[in-house]
């Protein structure tokens, strides 16, 4: 995704090239943070920095700060999306960015082209090619060196010089990215993972050169055994296989890491690539109407465009003409197409099937729902969890401590009478095995994969803080209308004068047809529910002729149907008009929790039509899953107590808060928090926004308002109850993965450094273990793709 510039808040996403570990992240953040009013969050996995800065600070100053830290800042290209660059602030900042087209080259970079994470599939592939070439060449040269060193029988006369000829290009050219990065960072007063790698491998290589030229290792017939631990014959041992092997293993780890990063970010890239590149816009009116094929960037709000079967919708808008099925699986994760007709809203990048549509564009470019989802996902990927912030603080001092430990290791070995070769071997092993790559990747890789998987399943995680809170919540407050129920009035029953319940019998069908005929011109939700219910039974009612129609606001409607006086509305309204209410209908009215519409004809109420908000399919299963996740569910609603209790009973919820105002919902959230509970709130309306914002974890349903979504921590594009449990499960799985990654990264260093210092690890084994720790973190994170 193109880097974003949020003009109103003066926030920019800078690409950062040359970072290799958590120490690099800490250094960039500190350098940027030294500028007045600047706050920065740097992400190793995405290689980006989210920087907030005041108008008194220029983008040039940010770039210079990154350069001063020893890295390269990539300024995002000017945005082309519609609806974004017309404000004064936007124009000013856009000019600043355009004035720095070559910012990526202003600072030295440790083979930046080889380290750049893929911001797109093509860019990522291009970035990894030089690194892959380095790996292949180094591996071909290293394998004979390692094999000969490990198998004494293969150590022919002057084998050591043959090994030097093969190992030298690996150490110098193959390890150049590490050496250059270490030098650049050292020049800026920074010690990073590359420092440890470069120092360790060059030490092993330099000692080998000394032993070959000035010691006994260059003599004909020299042999030595390969061991897992240290070895040392004064002046007679070489460590060429260690120097070359560590470099090759680390290059392999770097390649695997980059490929895994690209794979982890594939969900977001796929999402962004869904938008069409061109669109057929209608120009002119009537007989002069014509289609014009234009680039998507030229589309403006208000334009009419055509979408044919199999094509993707170019912008968010409203259908003007045509009927079709629309595949919204890219937003909701559900494969079933949604039927659309004139007046229906459609979303950019959804696919049209079975018909052509003419759509009036409403939101285009960066304002579409697709673009907003992509921004939410990327925002989440740039953040850090509480655990990662702790890891970053530790890693900032980790490298200097490791160098001190390596020096202390060598001193102790020499002081205890061991050969210098053994002391150097142990020190090199400490340097190599302690590289904190895994610490820097632990959180961002898990978030990268978790948020991408969430986007595929219609779950938007707004940031790492949401993951932290999802792991803590023990109580979930569920709004009723629009969350557990459909939020739309629908026909729930018809009771006739003889007490028969249902619309299938002749009396019920006739009463329903009569009511539908009277209500056909009304836009009231209750009237719409009656008409839809009658349509489901058949179109016969549409043939009924209605005359003398009159609407009585808030009460009902009257008229003559086929010449016979009739009325539909509140039961009391019909009784007031003189219609007689049978005893069976009076009893039903007293027992029903739904909205009642009495239908009268020929002086008598013929039936009671019941209209209500139905419980969503899968709501009961969703509540059961939430309880299985250890959450205590409670129902919140502004509805009356009886219908609220009925819905709660059908869902197996014991705790009900009915007749609650928006302020009341907020008060309940705070009361629960005051009692020591960690509260999740689920809602979809403006009336839920305050409670969503106050809750420890706010979850906005997919069919809800923008106010609810902006106040939430998890936003669902799937408008179904099951998505609630899915979201919490995914958030918790992502958090578990982060904690697991950090645990193993720390545990690896805690366990391995003493082993290396004690001489139990050959530096090449240490290098393999260090590379594996990073690969393990990446692979462990990728398991979330199956969550």
Image (cartoon, rainbow, N blue to C red):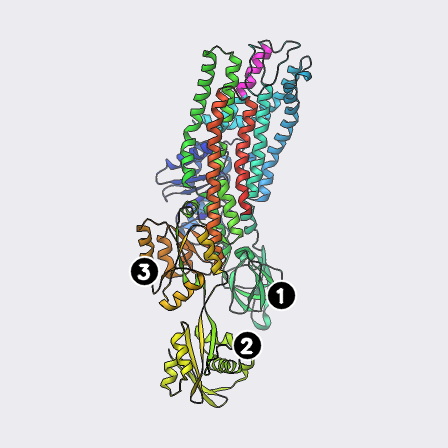
Label 1, secondary structure: give it.
Answer: loop
> Which-is-in-front pick, marks 2 and 1?
2
Q: Residue at x 59, y 66 (%)?
A: 324
Q: Is residue 416 left or right of residue 275?
A: left
> Which of the two marks, 3 or 1, is nearer to us in this view?
3
- Secondary element at tag 3: helix
Task: State the CA–CA distance, disc 2 to disc 3.
Answer: 41 Å
Tell me, yes or no, whether the two marked residues, 2 and 1, touch with CB atoms within 8 Å. Answer: no
Identify the secondary structure beneath mark 2. helix
Which range is magenta?
A: 202-213
**Among the two numbered marks 3 and 1 on one chain, the one whose residue lies closer to the N terminus:** 1
Label 2 or label 1, whichever comes before in sequence order: 1
Dot label at residue 76: none
Q: Which residue is mark 2?
A: 537
Looking at the picture, tell me which residue is in the foreground, 38 or 687.
Answer: 687
Q: Is residue 462 magenta?
A: no
Residue on which the image places disc 1 = 354
The image shows residue 769, relative to residue 56, as above or below, that is above
Callout 2 touching callout 3 (CB < 8 Å) = no
Q: Residues within 10 Å of mark 3 (few under 14, many from 20)?
A: some
Label 2 or label 3, whichever comes before in sequence order: 2
| Residue 760 image offset from top left, x and y in percent | 52, 21
Q: Is residue 557 left or right of residue 509?
A: left
Q: Residues within 10 Å of mark 2 (few under 14, many from 20)?
A: some
Residue position marked by numbered label 3 in the rendering: 664
């Amino acid at each position: 995704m193109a880097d974003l510039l949020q003009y109103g808040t003066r926030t920019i996403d800078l690409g950062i090239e040359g970072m290799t570990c958590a120490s690099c992240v800490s250094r960039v953040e500190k350098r940027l943070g030294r500028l007045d009013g600047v706050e920065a969050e740097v992400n190793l996995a995405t290689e980006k920095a989210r920087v907030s800065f005041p108008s008194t600070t220029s983008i040039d100053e940010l770039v210079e700060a990154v350069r001063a830290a020893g890295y390269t800042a990539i300024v995002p290209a000017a945005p082309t999306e519609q609806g974004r660059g017309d404000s004064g602030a936007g124009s000013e900042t856009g000019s600043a960015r355009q004035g720095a087209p070559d910012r990526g080259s202003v600072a030295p970079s440790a083979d930046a082209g080889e380290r750049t994470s893929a911001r797109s599939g093509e860019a990522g592939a291009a970035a990894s090619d030089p690194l892959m070439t380095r790996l292949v060449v180094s591996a071909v040269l290293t394998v004979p060196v390692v094999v000969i060193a490990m198998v004494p029988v293969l150590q022919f006369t002057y084998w050591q010089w043959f090994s030097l000829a093969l190992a030298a290009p690996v150490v110098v050219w193959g390890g150049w990215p590490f050496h250059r990065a270490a030098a650049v960072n050292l020049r800026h007063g920074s010690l990073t993972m590359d420092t440890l790698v470069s120092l360790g491998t060059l030490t092993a290589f330099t000692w080998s050169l000394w032993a070959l030229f000035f010691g006994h290792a260059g003599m004909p017939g020299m042999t030595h055994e390969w061991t897992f631990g240290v070895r040392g014959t004064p002046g007679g041992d070489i460590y060429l296989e260690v120097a070359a092997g560590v470099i090759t293993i680390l290059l392999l780890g770097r390649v695997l890491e980059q490929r895994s990063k690209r794979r982890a970010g594939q969900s977001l890239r796929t999402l962004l690539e869904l938008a069409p590149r061109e669109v057929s816009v209608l120009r002119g009116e009537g007989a002069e109407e014509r289609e014009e094929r234009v680039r998507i960037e030229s589309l403006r709000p208000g334009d009419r465009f055509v979408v044919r079967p199999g094509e993707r919708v170019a912008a968010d808008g409203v259908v003007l003409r045509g009927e079709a099925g629309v595949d919204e699986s890219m937003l909701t994760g559900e494969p079933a197409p949604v039927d659309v007709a004139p007046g229906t809203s459609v979303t950019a990048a959804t696919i049209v099937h079975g018909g052509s549509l003419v759509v009036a564009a409403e939101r285009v470019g960066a304002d579409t729902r697709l673009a907003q989802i992509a921004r939410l996902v990327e925002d989440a990927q740039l953040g850090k969890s509480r655990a990662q912030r702790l890891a970053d603080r530790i890693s900032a001092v980790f490298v200097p401590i490791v160098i001190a430990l390596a020096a202390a290791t060598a001193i102790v070995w020499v002081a205890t009478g061991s050969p210098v070769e053994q002391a150097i071997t142990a020190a090199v092993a400490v340097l190599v095995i302690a590289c904190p790559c895994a610490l820097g990747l632990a959180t961002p890789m898990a978030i990268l994969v978790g948020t991408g998987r969430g986007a595929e399943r219609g779950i938007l995680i707004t940031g790492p803080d949401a993951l932290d809170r999802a792991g803590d919540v023990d109580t979930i407050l569920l709004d009723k209308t629009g969350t557990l129920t459909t939020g739309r009035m629908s026909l729930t029953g018809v009771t006739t004068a003889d007490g028969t319940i249902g619309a299938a019998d002749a009396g019920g069908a006739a009463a329903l047809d009569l009511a539908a005929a009277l209500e056909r011109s009304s836009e009231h939700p209750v009237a719409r529910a009656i008409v839809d219910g009658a349509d489901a039974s058949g179109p016969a009612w549409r043939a009924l002729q209605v005359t003398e129609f009159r609407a009585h606001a808030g009460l009902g409607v009257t008229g003559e149907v086929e010449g016979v006086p009739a009325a539909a509305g509140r039961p009391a309204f019909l009784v007031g008009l003189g219609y007689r209410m049978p005893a069976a209908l009076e009893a039903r009215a007293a027992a029903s929790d739904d909205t009642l519409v009495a239908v009268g004809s020929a002086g008598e109420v013929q039936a009671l039509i019941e209209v209500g908000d139905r419980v969503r399919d899968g709501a009961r299963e969703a509540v059961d899953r939430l309880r299985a996740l250890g959450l205590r569910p409670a129902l919140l609603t502004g509805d009356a107590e009886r219908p609220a209790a009925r819905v709660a009973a059908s869902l197996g919820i014991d705790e009900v808060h009915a007749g609650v105002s928006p302020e009341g919902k907020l008060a309940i959230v705070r009361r629960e928090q005051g009692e020591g509970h960690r509260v999740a709130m689920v809602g979809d309306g403006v009336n839920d926004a305050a409670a969503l914002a106050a809750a420890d974890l706010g979850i906005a349903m997919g069919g809800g308002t923008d106010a609810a979504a902006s106040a939430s921590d998890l936003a669902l594009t799937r408008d179904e109850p099951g998505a609630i449990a899915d979201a919490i499960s995914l958030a918790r799985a992502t958090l578990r993965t982060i904690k697991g990654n950090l645990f193993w990264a720390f545990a690896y260093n805690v366990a391995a450094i003493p082993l290396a210092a004690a001489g139990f690890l050959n530096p090449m084994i240490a290098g393999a273990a260090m590379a594996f720790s990073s690969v393990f973190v990446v692979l462990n994170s990728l398991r979330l793709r199956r969550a």
